[in-house]
Every structure is written in C-alpha cells, then in structure tokens.
Amino acid sequence: RALGLTADDLLDLPRQIGNAFAKERTPILGRAEDAQPVVEQIKPIGIRELLGKHTELRRPIIHHVLRSGETMNIIAAPKTGKSWMVLDLAMCVATGRPWFNRFPVEKAPVLLIDNELHDETLAGRIKTVADAKGIKIDALDGMMEVRSLRGELQSFAQLEESLFKGMKPGQYAMIIFDAFYRFNTEDGADENDNGYMASVYNRLDKLAKSLDCCLVCIHHTSKGNQSDKAVTDVGAGAGSMSRAADTHLVLREHELAGHLVIDAATRSWPPLEGTVVRFDYPLFHPEPLADPRAYKKARKGSEDGWTPERFAEEIVGKTAVDGKTVLARSLKAGLTESRCKTLRMAAEGDGLIENIGGKTKTALWVCRVQITHSGSHSGSLSESSPNQVCKADDSVGETLKGSPHRINQQPVGATE
C-alpha cells in the first residue's frame, strides 16, 4: 500500500512474481485470471510466393553432404577413430580442404565442443592431426576454436545459456558436438525414448537457425555387426534420431582389416555412393579401388564347425568340470576364450549344460542330455543315472549324489 499499489496490483503480484522466474514469460494484462500466453500466429504461404522467395538451396558447408542450418549425425562404433575423424573434419572446413579428398568444403569458422577429452589430450591431438595434414597452427587461428567440457559437463539446455546466448549469428559455420550422448544429461533424458530424442533435435534445429550454422553430432553404434542394417537403422538409441537429422552418416567395418565404409542418407542432396577409407594413424585415407559394398560380415556360429551340441559333448562331457577345465579344453581344441564363452552360454541357453556349482571360481558345468551322433539331444542324463559320480579333471574329487540342481540362473565361469 505504501508503494501506491492498487487492489488489482496486489491481486496480480503473485502472478507477476512467478512470471518473473518463468522460462517463458507471458504478458501481464491486468488481473491474474485474465493473463493468457501469447501464441504467435502462423500463416500458410502460397506456392508462387514460396518459389519467388527461395530460388536456391541453402549454402553448402560440405558439398554432397551438409548445408547451413542442417544437422548431421556421424555414427561409428566405439574406438574406431571417430574423434580423430572429427578433428580432420574441423580442420578441413577451417582451411577449405576437401574432406577425405572427396567432398569439397566451404572455408568457414568451426567450433568443436568436446566432452570426452581433457584439454591436454585435445591439444596434443590437434597438433598431431595438423602436423600430419601439413597445416600450420597459424592457419587455424581464428578459424577453429574448441571448448573441452570434460569434468564440467553441460546439457544442450545449459549450453544455450552459458555459451550460445552470447554468440552472434554466423559466428561459426559449423558447431561439432563430441560425444552426443554426454550432452543429454538433464532429468528424464532417455536416449531410447523417441519423444525425448525428437525434442532434442527440435532444440538443435532452433539452435542452427538462430546461429545460422550447421550442427554435427558424433554418436556411437549399437552393439553387434552393422552390415545388414539400412543406413538409417545404424546408431544406438531411438529411431527418431536418424529421422530428425538432415544427414545421417555412418561408418561400418569393411572386409579389409582397418578399413571402413562411409554411407549417408541425406535430405537435401542426391543419394550418396559409399566410400571406403583406411585409418592410418592419425588420419583416414580414401581407398577408391576398394568395393564399398564389401562390408565385414558377422561370423556365423557354425563356420568353425562348433555347435552348442558339440561343445556340450566334447568340451563339457558327462562329468562335472570347473570353468578352468572348460577353458583349457576349449583352447586345446583351437577355440578362443571369447568363442568358448559364446558356445557355453548358447549350450546353457539350449538346456544342454548346467551350472551345478556356484559363481565364478566354484562354477561346475555338466552335460544335461545325451548327445546323439547327429548332433541332437535325446534326454536328461540325470534321469537315466541319478546317482552318477561326476569328477572334474583332477580338480574336483567330490561325489555329487542325486539329480544336480540349479544354484544360480546366470552361469559365471572362469572365462568371464
């Protein structure tokens, strides 16, 4: 009252205080109950007007791949050299050099935001790549800038306030986010949620528009072989991620060791033919003579002649054996430790073998069925010989009476 506020002002005071701290403020039009958010009206545009206003496509940043205002995903398996490729890409744009000696670029300033490498590591890698490409650091000054967030991670929403809010449109032509998953840290973030990831890319679209630049998100593949997947199906997380991006560029293993195949699905460019590159530390080099369709295929389980049935019969056998014995027999038979684990898990999943011991060091494996010469199994051993004495190879001398029983559902042998 001493400030001269009216009754209406006092009524509106709680509304105004709340509005002052709101993320999106709405006009105060008098009484609180009369205040309504103002929604910007949109209006359709005629075809003739549309064609008259937009006679050309957006300016390219990477020819055949990416334009200003667009978002690109770069997807590759972990530890395949993605971060080295990112530095190569940034330097190519900053200096106007073709990417992979195939894709022309427009020389323009680049910002790399990295949340996996420490400043010292990032500095060392930049110098290594620049030296390998024959680029002087002076040539990058003012054209390539970096910011490491290792140890002080921020989400896209936080970066809008702490970094992007102070940027001018066109200050950078390209902003790279490496690694993408570490920017999705706010409450409720779920990489596998289509709705959530669609909202993330909506935010990125607004950012690209307001800053007049293109955005590049570095992400990883899901587990397993990727050769049989469509380009837009490659990548961990929700399917909306590949659909929302303007360019979805993926790197998959080639049948030649150390080689990768680059494929891309683009929105504003004609279909792109695959490219084979070879990683020769610290750079990727194109291999124009290699067949881009020759992906590395997933190894079939029976290629080496071993099946879960054969593993149960020849490696485990009718007497209980511990994990060390299983591994020793597998190695002697020419199997790798990884292949041994795969076959053991498959045999257990098919009900061919069972862990009748404990976990890890106390695991005891026994064949639970009679294996025929054809590879099929004909019944439980415990039913035919319930009091069978099971002795591991000189390591287990204990008599197991009665039908063996399952102790733990998830077998963990010495090979894990």
Image (cartoon, rainbow, N blue to C red):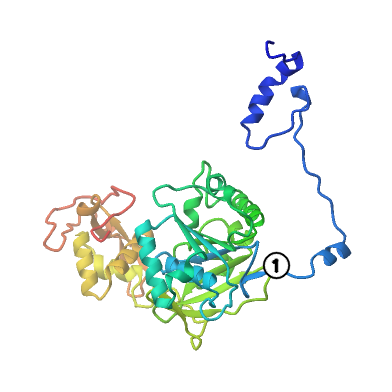
Label 1 secondary element:
loop
- Mark count: 1
Say left or right for 217 vs 382: right
Residue drawn at x 84%, y 54% as measured from the top left: 44
Query: Residue 375: percent from the left, percent from the top?
Result: 35, 72
| Quadrant housing the C terminus | bottom left
Query: Residue 298: percent from the left, percent from the top?
Result: 44, 73
161 and 405: which one is in front?
Answer: 161
- The relative height of residue 122 versus residue 157 in the rendered view (above or below) is below
Q: Is residue 385 visible?
A: no
Say left or right for 166 vs 11: left
Q: Is residue 266 visible?
A: yes
148 and 65: which one is in front?
Answer: 148
Query: Residue 192: percent from the left, percent from the top?
Result: 53, 52
Residue drawn at x 58%, y 78% as measured from the top left: 104
Query: Residue 57: percent from the left, percent from the top?
Result: 73, 69
Q: Residue lying farthest bottom?
A: 289
| Quadrant housing the N terminus | top right
- The relative height of residue 6 versus residue 221 in the rendered view (above or below) is above
- The relative height of residue 396 versus residue 291 in the rendered view (above or below) is above
Return the residue at label 1. 58
Residue drawn at x 18%, y 52% as measured from the top left: 400
Residue drawn at x 33%, y 74% as measured from the top left: 306
Few, some or many residues within 10 Å of mark 1 (<14, 14–19, 20+): few
Q: Residue lying farthest top?
A: 2
Say left or right for 72 vs 279: right
Residue type at numbered disc 1: Arg
Res 238 → quadrant: bottom right
